[in-house]
Image (cartoon, rainbow, N blue to C red):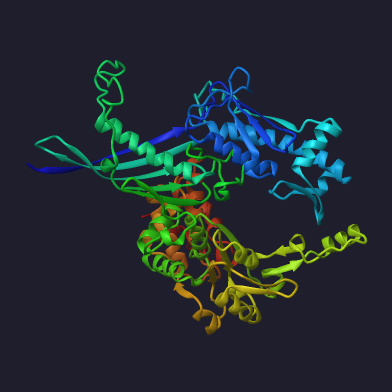
Amino acid sequence: MARHRGRGIASINYPIGMNLGGDPSQALVHSNPSGKFTVSLSSIDLGQGMKSVTRQICAETLGVPVEDVYVDTADSDTGPHCMGSFASRGTHRVGNAVMAAAKEARGVMMEAAAEELEVNAADLETDGRGNIHVKGAPHRSISTKDVAIAAQFKQGKTISGRGIFLVPLSAVDPETGEMSPATCYAHACMVAEVEVDDETGEVAMVRMDSAYELGRALNPRLVEQQLVGGAWMGVSHALFETTEPYYPDSSHGPRDFVEYLMPGPGDVCPHDIAVLERPARQRDFQRGRGARRRTADHAGESTARDQGAGWRAAAGAALMVVRGTIGGIDGPEALEKALRAAYYLADDGIATAAYLALALGKPLLLEGVPGVGKTEAAKAIAATLGRRLIRLQCYEGIDAAAALYEWNYPRQMLAIRQAGDETIDIYGEAFLIERPMLAALRAPDSTVLLIDEIDRSDQEFEAFLLEFLSDFQISIPERGTIRAAERPVVVLTSNRTRDLHEALRRRCVYHWIDYPTAEREARIIMMRASSVAEATARAVVAAVGKLRREPLSKAPGVAEAVDWAEAATLLNKGGARWPDAFKRSIGVALKDEEDLAFIAGRLDALIAEAAA
């Protein structure tokens, strides 16, 4: 008896919805006298979580708590029209319809509130907690419940909205046959490893590895459950059912659940899942309430990212490894893999430095010449952690007001005049303007603070940073000391135009980023510009390598190499031959008049040698 191992691979390109005959969905949103809102749909929740997602979208658009929204998917005969719950179209199509309806209902709600507060509707804002108040004067407010009561019983208004999202019919070009059968696509790939007993025929799952490109995860938990559950269904279908050659004849199938075989907990193998979030260009929705306020297009269905993230499900138990928790990354290798899912190809040095900074709770200081990917590293770390990136761009003369906070003086004056004889606290939350460092302190578990190009600032500002980087606290005289509840993730970058103070360096985990090797730079180009062929990427790498050895005032960085490869490919597709395509697009790589003049005489030979 012997056991043999084998691997199988499958990949898909999956269209969302359909365009062949138009693909509309409608939604209705209305409030009741208690200030709660109902979303009426004919789209059915089949377990994909559409109710949860549309509820989040409606709440965010209205500016009310998600608990105040109910989704009713009653009947396709009485509800607003929808093409149906199929083709993973629910959140993309129906979600946009709900958003349009909620926008219209919000407009009516704000007009009704404006009438009660005797102000212009444009001067009102919602606080997300069920209240509407005058901008700059939070003491002048009204609850959404009181607005709903006034609208229906006093003003004779219905707080409601209608929405439709239509993907128009895609006409076929009679000459070329070209058309757009879908608006956006999802992509996935899975590798399964199995072990087969050649005596008994028993098949055991060893492990699965998969990657999914699926738009934005508005509700990460739903995405996680669908991906793990879908893999479980695939195992069940392949190993526990006999569909061929009988399908669709079901006479061979089980008669009840007693005879129905399916995998149990002991049959589920370790499963490593990488999720790439790439929102569709058609999306309009930016942020959702609930589920940790994850931004999203989709919840388990697909549209297409913005920021990368990864999940791992081990031994059948789904576990998010890089979503909001630093502790889920258990080493440099895991971080390197997660960064790669966020389209950042890190070497061992930067992966180790970044991991140590995260694990030790220290700022990460990245130095290097311009264009080597320091800022992109910070963006990728934020995407990997599923956090919002807060960027503080340094410049000569930057001060605490630009980095920490300042008081909104015009709003304070307006509030004082409107309060009259009433007592008002003009140093309340409504009058405080957050700047990047304060914003990071107040939300350390959901943000990454990037202090970009610290070497551009004055030494006085650098000294000012020392307390912040040591204790992660700031003092506001009118309000006291504000401390971070936990150590925030902070990344500093420097082009080394001047030496940084030793005291600042001691507070950080340090890493110098050099230009990548030719092999890694070619991989970066092909990762960031998928339309570029490998030969083109290698030719560009060879060319920029030669340019970097020239005495140029601004040598091309990695970003310029990616852009040059993409630009040359674009010209080639338009009919330009390769050497000419490289030469004509040189302005994408070199962006200084003197540099262009200096290299002009040798450009042909340089490109020919690089492309050889």
Choose between 247 and 380: the one closer to the eye.
247
Q: Which one is in front, 249 or 265? A: 265
The N terminus appears in which quarter of the rendering? top left
Find residue 82 and report its image quarter. Answer: top right
Residue closest to the far bottom: 502
Q: Position of residue 384 (x, y in %)?
A: 47, 56
Task: Describe residue 140's horizontal placement relative to residue 73 as left or right.
Answer: right
Describe residue 497's horizontal placement relative to residue 161 as left or right: left
What residue is drawn where x is 86% and y is 34%? Answer: 154
Q: Position of residue 417 (x, y in %)?
A: 91, 60
Residue located 9% across and 36% down the image: 199
Return the x and y of residue 137 as percentages of the image width and height. 82, 56
User: From the viewer's perspective, is residue 471 above or below residue 301?
Assistant: below
User: Residue 146: x and y, percent?
Assistant: 79, 41
Q: Nearer the viewer, residue 39 or 181?
A: 39
Query: Looking at the image, can residue 399 be seen?
Result: no
